[in-house]
Amino acid sequence: MARLKSTALAEQAQLKAAHKADPNAHKEALAKGIEPGARVRFREVPQQGYEQLGGLEHYGVVRSVAKDHLVVEQNGAIYSKKGRLKEMFRGGKDIVVADYKIPFTNVKEVMGKGRLAERKPSATKSWPAPPERKGGYDNCDIGDCANPPVKAYAIRSFDRETTQLGAPRIAALCREHDEKWPTLTEEEKKGIPSKEPTVVPMLWRMGVTFESWRIPPKVSDEKEE
């Protein structure tokens, strides 16, 4: 779960202060059973500017222990009063809600053994290869640019008089020429014409864009000496 930058800064400050105040807290925590796999009641580090509130309390399972802090995982599992693992819904025990980095003094109670979520590796998005075209994808299609293209677009020219679209074709652009459509300024959003002329990227001057593909970098056949 993404954390605010202010929260991360507050965490670092509190962790340093806690470690400086009690350098032996790590050993004391281990003696109390605060170790990976232990289920604990803990208080989170408050966001910067809200330190007076003290942070909210949560239940979680210790994921890792360092010399100056520990990481507690809050997942979708629930436990009975006797400490037996239950599920609020199927698969909930393997859903990670958040990870909290806290000083040892923020652990309020050790409640026995818990279960860490089985984290699945993040799925990397696979991009389909661009379709074959005459001439391949050696160079960028803008002017005389000789840079290797990184993106391919399916485009169709637009006839303003007949309002008809032409035959589809593939255009390849390098990183420099792969320009985004200009965003509206605050004045333009209110209907006020911009004083500066709008520069339309070359791709959109070529036609209407449809599907797009990433072009993988070309692998050199030359061997390094």
Image (tube, helix red, strand yellow):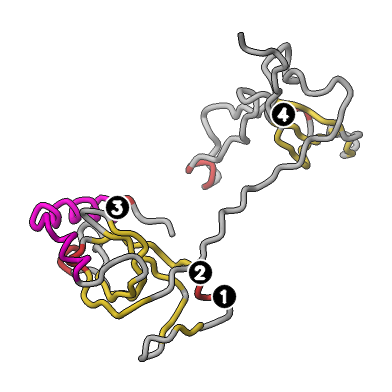
Q: Residue at x 43, y 73 (%)?
A: 115
Disc 3 element: helix
Q: CB under 8 Å between callouts 3 and 4? A: no
Closer to the camera: disc 3 or disc 2? Answer: 2
**Horizontal side of residue 5 vs 109, given as left or right:** right
How far, Cα to Cα, is label 3 from label 4?
Answer: 41 Å
**Pick the front one: 162 or 84:** 84
Q: Earlier in the sequence, mark 1 or mark 4?
A: 1
Q: Earlier in the sequence, mark 3 or mark 4?
A: 3
**Pick the front one: 164 or 75:** 75
Q: Earlier in the sequence, mark 3 or mark 1?
A: 3
Asked whether 86 falls inside the magenta stretch, the response is no
- Neighbor class of circle 4 (other Cα within 10 Å; few <14, some 14-19, many 20+) is many
The residue carrying mark 1 is: 91
The residue carrying mark 4 is: 203
Q: CB under 8 Å between callouts 2 and 1? A: yes
Disc 1 element: loop
Q: CB under 8 Å between callouts 3 and 1? A: no
How far, Cα to Cα, is label 1 from label 4?
Answer: 46 Å
Residues drawn in magenta: 6-31
How far, Cα to Cα, is label 4 from label 2?
Answer: 42 Å
